[in-house]
Amino acid sequence: MDSIDIFKKTIYDYYQDNRRDFIWRRDPTPYQVVVSEIMLQQTQTARVVAKYTQFITELPSFQALAAATTRQVLVLWQGLGYNRRGLALHDLAKQVVEQYGGVLPSDPELLQKFKGIGPATAGSICAFAFNKPTVFIETNIRSVFIHAFFKDKEQVHDKELLPLVEAALDKNNSREWYYALTDYGVMLKKTCKNPARKSAHHQVQSKFEGSTRQIRGLILKMLAEHFSLTQEQIIAYIPRDKNKILKILDILSQEKIIKERDATYFL
């Protein structure tokens, strides 16, 4: 038995006794997979679970999401952070309905043309929604392969991992294989120093308090809760630098995420 076979047996043996149960794994329709994968980007699974159920209940299909208002989407997205992801998901649903008749493409290259979907997310969607043997790397998968094959090396590049990911891929059931890898990666983070820190792609997340990301989120949260707010009200509600708030309001307006009329803002 070669090293890849031993590796696969280790992963599947662990998965058999320790697999995690999530609602999006029970019924992996293309829509449910897309929603879960975009929600899980840069967000802990525990935070996603409750929001996912609420989101899917209120907007159960690409058609329902496409027909929703920006306000509806952002209200449902509250608590997940990175509101751009929610807006990108909204745009994706509109494209799926308008350009693909409500049917999500199963081609990774086509999926990457949607806003908010890069190579890793496109690969994961194809594997989980269509059980296609795609090759991709995300944080947990990266951790598993570094831990198994590069224990004594620093600055491991993804190009070193990809051939191993491809060699180990269960082409008959990529969906379950990637579930198993992900669950094993989560276990590694709890039991040993995060192997992903040895990746050449590892980045320490910037401070959230007082960041542009935090202020953007606060502005959108307030506008989701109120029909409209004046510039003065927004500044009064957010105890941060006034000039920074004004700059972010201008950027959000330019990005067409919010609308402005006579120094009053709304979604």
Image (tube, helix red, strand yellow):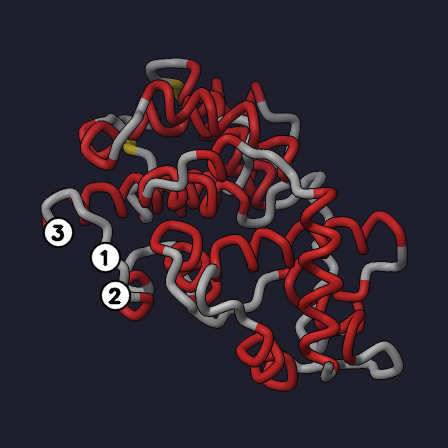
Instruction: Check if mark 2's residue and mark 3's residue have beta carbons within 8 Å.
Output: no
Judged left or right of residue 239, residue 65 is left
Q: Please report the residue visible at 31 percent of the width from the left and 25 percent of the height from the top.
A: 59
Secondary structure at badge 2 equals: helix
Q: Which mark is residue 100?
A: 3
Q: Please report the residue visible at 73 percent of the width from the left and 50 percent of the height from the top.
A: 186
CA–CA distance between discs 1 and 2?
A: 7 Å
Mark 1 surroundings: few (<14), some (14-19) or many (≥20) residues within 10 A: some
Q: Is residue 194 visible?
A: yes
State the residue in front, 126 or 206. Answer: 126
Residue extending furthest toward the top: 226
The residue identified by callout 2 is 110
Q: How far across and how far down the image is residue 4, in percent?
A: 68, 78
- The three-letter amino acid code for the residue at tag 2 is Leu
Q: Please report the residue visible at 48 percent of the width from the left and 64 percent of the height from the top.
A: 120
- The three-letter amino acid code for the residue at tag 1 is Pro
